[in-house]
Every structure is written in structure tokens, then in C-alpha cells.
Amino acid sequence: MTDRTSRESDTGFPPAPYAWYVVVIIFIAYTFAFIDRIIVAMLTPAIQAEFGISDSQTGLLQGLAFALFYTLFGLPLGLLTDRWNRKRLLAIGMTVWSVATALCGTARSFSLLFLARMAVGMGEGALNPCATSLIGDYFPPRTRSRAFGVYVMGTACGTGITYLLGGLLLGWLTKNGGLDLPIFGHLKPWQAMFVVVGVPGLIPALLFLLTVREPARREVATRTARASGADIRAFVAANKLTLFCHHFGIALILMSIYAYINWMPTYFLRIHGWEPPRFSTTYGLYSIAAGIFSALASGWFATWLKDRGYTDGTMRACMIGSAGCVIGCTVSPLMPTPEAALVGYILTGCFVNAPSVLGLSAVAEMVPNEMRGIITASYIVMIGLLSAGVGPFAVGFVTDFVFADKAAVGSSLLVTSLITGVPGVVLLAIGLKAYRETLARAGWAATGT
């Protein structure tokens, strides 16, 4: 028996080198997904000028257009994750969201752009349920948080690449008046951006389909390894407080994160006079470093807490990181100079991935394998509706109808962070005891199956 085979049989999980290879591929996919998700934020001034839309409409385009199908398709895709080939499902999702992003560049009206953004959400609806389920089967519990840290690092790289390289590319496209492409014809700078960032996302889709193996399902609670509706309802009923605090608490925190990520370019333009290319290239490099740090440090911190006897280390680390993020989101818009505001948002980035990394890790830690897809999907529904959907819209709504002043976008960011982030952290704190009780009831984990 080879060392590789021995390691796999001894631990019940695939060999670590191959498992990390799979996570890297999913990380690359998440990077492209996040670029496709937030590229509209950088293009907000150009899209508003093109279609003559308000801040509230822009918030709908940034949030609801994506979140509507992200959530509508999330639950059926989550159920499909638990019952079908996850490798194929995720490869299909990657293809759909990449093609839909490119099609955003062909939109000739606000309505068509809205529809294309909905299709992006539909494709991305497969990502988190499949990734959570797959990572749970590739990594044992002790190292799982670190694996999720690498996976969620895609949000940091996606954000940084969008702002850094996207800012440079947008500046070049603006200088040259757009781009002429086969099939697409002549595209304005903002249209060309959608096509250029969308098409390369097909590369990880093909790589994933051809090189990744569907792993065996482990840590199951039912004899058939397929949860019935009654099984799922029983699990939810037994753990309703844990799931409520987890889902709703993290969703509220992510509302403030999605709000500032989507409105930062507009905030720096209106308040500090920085054009999108200048802001993007300045912020992008630092945001990559801060985001990578937060993604990796979150997993390591959770493991460190568990090694010191905190059985709720995953959610405790999530709560601490979320508190740091909320403080940063609240303080940064108050800074008097663009440089000070930039430093504030960079420091916020050092905490920004804790809710995403540890929220998914907690699902894999407390939920039986045959329910991870659907429970993850229910979590993503909450995030989609509140975080990605309402978060960006809330800033535009407060700017238009509360302050009635476009120059008040910084105050809108502050208000949104306070009324969403603080209750989110409180819910996570309330849920720690319930989370420990849920882990204690997870008899399936102790069987080693």
C-alpha cells in the first residue's frame, strides 16, 4: 500500500495535496465570481450617465438584480447539491455566471442590464452550497476552517483585482474610447469591462470539470445518506436558535460589508473628488493584502481557539472578526481626508472576510453531510436577500430619501453600518451557547462515517 493510499484510508479523507488543489480551483472560481459580482460598483458613474438612473435604481442594480435569482435558485440548487454530482453542478454554475457577465456588456437598456445581472446571480447560486459540501468531504474538521479561509480568499482577490487591475483597465479603455471585439462589435468602456472580466471565468469552469473528482460523502446522519424532508425539518427544529443567530446575524453584518464595497468608488468620487480609476488603483493593492490576511487569519484564529478548549471557536472567532469589521465600516466614512478614509477601509479589510469564512465553516461543522447543501442554501438565501440585495440598496435609499443629498453618501454608509452591523454582532454573541449545544448533539461527527 502506498503512503498516499494509506493516508486516505487512515483519515477517511482524500490526500491533503489533492484536497488543497481542489480548494485552489474553487478559490479561483470564487475570485472570478466576486469580480463578476462587484464590477458594477466601479462602473456606477458610467452606468448612471448612460441610462440616467438614480442612486436607488443603482442600488437595485448592484443588489437586488443579482440577489433575486441568487436566492430564488439557491434553495433548489442546494437540494440538488445534496443529491447530485457536485462537480458537474458547480462547473455549470461557473459557466452560467461567466457568460451572463459578458452579456451585461451587450445591454442597451437598464432593463436588459438588470436581467443579465439576474442571470449572474442564478449561476452563482450553485457556488456556496457546492463548495461547502465539497470542502466538508475533502478536509477533516480540524483543518476545515483553514480550507474555507483559502476558498473565501477569493472575495479578497476578487475585490482587489476588480479595483486594482480593473481601475487600470478602465482608465485605458476610457482613454481609447472603448474596444472593438469580434461578435460584440464596438463597446463603450463600461461595456467592454463586463466582457473582459466575464469570458475568462470559463477557464476555471473547464479546469474544474476535467481535473476534479467527485469525493465520497462523509459525516452522514441517515442510513441512506439522503435526508428526507422530515429529517431536514427535525434538524432545523432541534437547532432553530443556532441557525437563526448564525444565518440572520451574519447576514446583517454582511449588509454593511456589501454596502461599503459597492459604494466606495462613488463615495470617494463625490466626497473626496477621486475618479474611479484613481481610487481603484490606489485601493486595490492594499485591499488584496488586507483581504487575504483576513481570510487566512480567520481560519487560523478559529483553530487556535479550538486548540485552547473553546468548542465554539469557529463562531467565537466569527463574532470577534465581525465586531472589528463593523467598527471599521462605521468609522471610515467619518474620516476628514481621502487618505484617512482609505486607511480606515484598508484596516476594515483585515476583518472583512471573517463572517464569510467562518459562517460557511460553521455550517460544515454542525450540519450532517446530506443536509449541508440545503442548509447552506438557506443561509445564502438570507445573505442574498439582506446582504447582497438590501445592503447596497439601503445606502442609495437613505441618500435619496432620508438625506435627499448625493453628497451625503458617507452619512448613508455610516447609518447603514450602525443599524445592521451592531445587531448582527449581538445575535452572534447570543448564539454562542446554542452553537455549543448543536455541536454536542452532532452524534454523526463522532461516528467517523
Image (cartoon, rainbow, N blue to C red):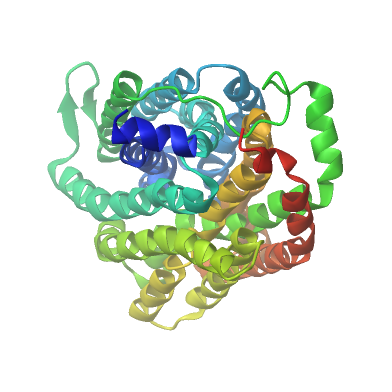
User: Quick one: quadrant of the C terminus?
Assistant: top right
Residue projecting furthest to the front = 1
In the depicted structure, whether residue 160 falls above or below residue 364: below
Percent position of residue 427, x then y: 75, 62
Look at 58% across and 64% down and name the residue there: 306
Percent position of residue 88, x then y: 44, 18
The one of 373 and 49 positioned closer to us in this rendering:
373
| Count of numbered labels shown in the rendering | 0
The one of 145 and 344 positioned closer to us in this rendering:
145
The one of 429 and 50 positioned closer to us in this rendering:
429
Look at 47% across and 51% down and name the residue there: 143
Residue projecting furthest to the bottom = 336
Q: Is residue 421 left or right of residue 127?
A: right
Percent position of residue 1, x then y: 32, 28
Which of the 4 quarters of the picture holds residue 224?
top right
> Is any part of residue 337 visible from this angle?
yes
In the depicted structure, whether residue 71 falls above or below residue 226: below
Percent position of residue 62, x then y: 51, 44
The one of 273 and 40 positioned closer to us in this rendering:
40
Look at 73% across and 65% down and name the residue there: 423
